[in-house]
Image (cartoon, rainbow, N blue to C red):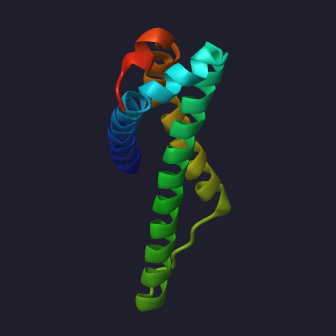
Amino acid sequence: MAVGIVSVFMLVGGIVIMNIMLAVVTERTHEIGIRKSLGARRRDILNQFLVESSCLAAAGGLAGVLIAWTLAVLVRNVTSVPMALPWSSVFLGVGLSGVVGLFFGIYPARRAARLDPIEALRVEK
């Protein structure tokens, strides 16, 4: 049951990250045009946006782990239910979040990398 719930949350979170990154690409179109006109390759632009989306998702995963840890400590101290948060779960949660951000950041990153520098520079700030 928990795996199904987490899967739905990861899918929704990935879609949110993709929409955020599409908005970022739209906002930075002029910047991308400048970078490409100065010699940045498609791979450079692609890597920039993939790293950004992955870091954004990993930060969200880290925030989720901190909330889970706080709740586990609270439940352990208030009730007699034993609660623990193993390090493997922390690494798995943050790593999986980063991978989801990487996967859902591919489309916006490719869109940014394929922008024509001349057309991108025509966009007003």
Query: Which of the 4 image quarters holds residue 96?
Result: top right
Residue at 49% over, 37% down: 101
Residue at 51% over, 71% down: 69
Query: Which of the 4 image quarters holds residue 119?
Result: top left
State how many labels appear. Answer: 0
Is residue 57 left or right of 86 when viewed as pictured?
left
Residue 77 in the image: state x and y as whole percent. Answer: 47, 89
Q: Is residue 15 above or below residue 58?
A: above
In the image shown, does 71 or 66 lie closer to the viewer?
Answer: 66
In the image shown, does 88 or 95 lie closer to the viewer?
Answer: 95
Image quarter of the C terminus:
top left
Is residue 9 left or right of 51 when viewed as pictured?
left
Residue at 43% over, 24% down: 108
Is residue 49 left or right of 123 when viewed as pictured?
right
Q: Is residue 116 visible?
A: no
Q: Is residue 65 above or below residue 91?
A: below
Q: Is residue 123 visible?
A: yes
Residue 9 in the image: state x and y as whole percent. Answer: 35, 45
Is residue 110 left or right of 20 when viewed as pictured?
right
Residue 92 in the image: state x and y as whole percent. Answer: 60, 49
